[in-house]
Image (cartoon, grey):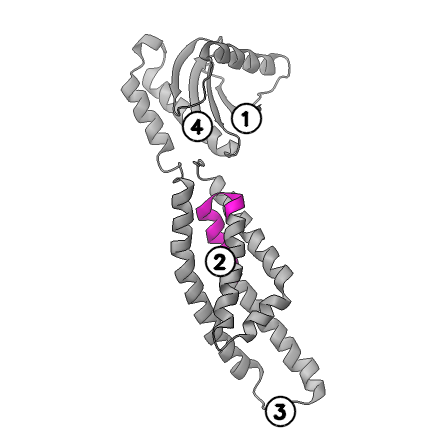
Amino acid sequence: MIKRLYIMRYNGTLLYSKHLTEGERFDDNILIGFFASLANFSREALESEIQYIDLGHDNKLVLFPHASEKLLATAIVSSIDDNELIMKILRDILQDFIGAFAPDYNPDEINEEEMESIIELNVSGKISYPLIKRLIFSWLLLIPLCIFLNFLNITSGDYIFQNLYLDKDIYTQEEIYTVVLPTMIRISLIVLLIVFILPNLISGYLVLDAKFAYLNSVIYIVLIMVIYFFTIESLFAYVILAYLPLVFLISIGFAYIGFRYAKKRKIIRN
């Protein structure tokens, strides 16, 4: 979450500041001098731009300089927020600031309402819902998706098993090892892919919190097991038990992929 936003000249002159959250207190005068000194030091001594600094206590500093205008946009954000996403937002805000107030950048002439509109325009659609809403939304989608995928899996699995691979009632021992078992393994893997990849990917994306995405994955595995044990296809439950380490890795892995993708698109709000 963006907590503080500052726009200043390279020499440290503050042009605009905005406190977007309540709670933590920062001394703006000290921070502004620190930001300007840090940016100037990195350019002159290191011949590069420092872009991110961990401030501790779930805070980090993100800086975006505009060399031609000698302006610097900085933000104090939550440590979990994606650096590239915050950089893009700062770049867009600074570009709109330049378009609105160039070339003088007189702090007394910077319209507060216009700046509010610029900030709103550039963060609109990029801030997540609170965590409790994200959890509710994830299960409102996961429950019907779980039912649909399992119905699809059971019906398609029966069809594939009976009509495409195994078309005989009696098999020899050699055929059991060369046909039946490989077929069952292939179908079992298809089951795992169908039932666990997409839901966990969606869950990780919607929840936008790694720990709760993993918790959702565990709950989802248990829910699937219960569904299978109480249907005529209880065999699938034993298949999942046999592949449980793989099921767990698939679930956690794709929940994390969904979380990482969402993190690049949304500012996380707890």
Residue type, mark 3 in image: Ile
The image's mark for residue 2 is 4
- Magenta stretch? 196-212
User: Does label 3 or label 4 sit earlier along the sequence?
Assistant: 4
The image's mark for residue 198 is 2
Residue 126 location in percent, x, y? 40, 37
Which residue shows up at 48% across the image and 57% down it? 199
User: Does label 1 or label 3 sit earlier along the sequence?
Assistant: 1
Which residue shows up at 48% across the image and 23% down it? 76
Q: Secondary structure at mark 4?
A: strand
> Image check: 181 left or right of 225?
right
Residue type, mark 2 in image: Leu
- Give the residue number, with chain letter if any, for mark 3: 170
Q: Are marks 2 and 3 in contact (CB under 8 Å)?
A: no
Name the quadrant of the N terminus.
top left
Dominant secondary structure (helix, strand or loop) of the stretch shown in magenta: helix
Name the quadrant of the C terminus.
top left
Q: Secondary structure at mark 2?
A: helix
Residue 102 location in percent, x, y? 35, 14
